[in-house]
Image (cartoon, helix red, strand yellow):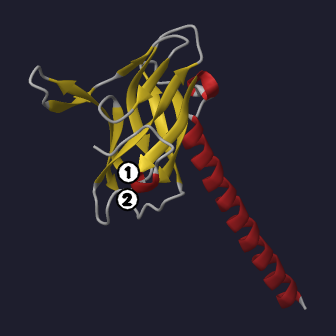
Amino acid sequence: MTYIVKLVIITNMKNTLSLLFGLLLITNAQAFMSGVSPEKDGGPKLQLIQGVIYKGPPNSSVTVGYGVIKNNTKKDLTITGVRSPVYDEVQIHSMEYTDNGTAKMIHEEDLLIPAGKEVVLESGGSHFMLMGPRRDIEVGQIIKMIVLDKRETRYMFDLKVIDPRKAHGHDHHMH
């Protein structure tokens, strides 16, 4: 009888430890994604409207992200970094055009979002360059991105993976 009671207690302890470990993982993931401390969580001060990622061809290591970044504050915000748990690297790029019509992609160190204004990320202009997918990306998935400003405040952006060949409702084009 004592043996059965000990077995039940040990089993319950294992279940409790598993539950506690799971809760710890979830809490740490939420803390990572939300900015860890409340003073570093930008919340809705900066938001991405209609954020999309173009699904590239099979085995593609690079794709683009578009949308409209809106600054809901009365102060200019400067984006200094972008990360995603799904990509090895996310950069901000812009296009530079010469007088003879040739275009050159430029890696930008930061992106200014003026107070109360919007910045459009689109083909032929500023955009997110997403490199090194860590897993297969499927149409319809929502990809999380963490955006940092120069004060190291974090903002959470959600981008939906779309098929660029069927993106007639978007003003963005593959580049």
Residue 24 place in picture, x, y as percent: 65, 53
Q: Amino acid at mark 1?
A: Tyr
Q: Secondary structure at mark 2?
A: loop
Residue at image mark 1:
87
Question: Residue 146, relative to residue 141: is it above or below?
Answer: above
| Front-most of residues 73 and 27 | 73
Residue 55 place in picture, x, y as percent: 40, 56
Residue 99 place in picture, x, y as percent: 11, 19
Q: Decide if residue 8 is on the left or right side of residue 98.
A: right
Badges 2 and 1: C-beta atoms under 8 Å apart? Answer: yes
* Mark 1 residue crowding within 10 angstroms, few (<14) / some (14–19) / many (20+): some
Residue located 59% across and 17% down the image: 72
| Front-most of residues 163 and 86 | 163
Q: Secondary structure at mark 1?
A: strand
Separation (CA) of disc 2 from disc 1 = 6 Å
Residue at image mark 2:
134
How many marks are shown on the rendered structure?
2
Question: Residue 145, relative to residue 16: is it above or below?
Answer: above
| Front-most of residues 153 and 77 | 77
Residue 110 place in picture, x, y as percent: 33, 23
| Front-most of residues 26 and 113 | 113
Q: Decide if residue 161 is on the left or right side of residue 27.
A: left
Q: Quadrant of residue 175?
A: top left
* Mark 2 residue crowding within 10 angstroms, few (<14) / some (14–19) / many (20+): few
Residue extending furthest toward the front: 168
Residue located 28% across and 59% down the image: 60
Q: Quadrant of residue 71?
A: top right
Q: Amino acid at mark 2?
A: Arg
Mark 2 or mark 1: whose residue is earlier in sequence: 1
Which quadrant, please, contains the N terminus? bottom right
Residue located 34% across and 57% down the image: 56
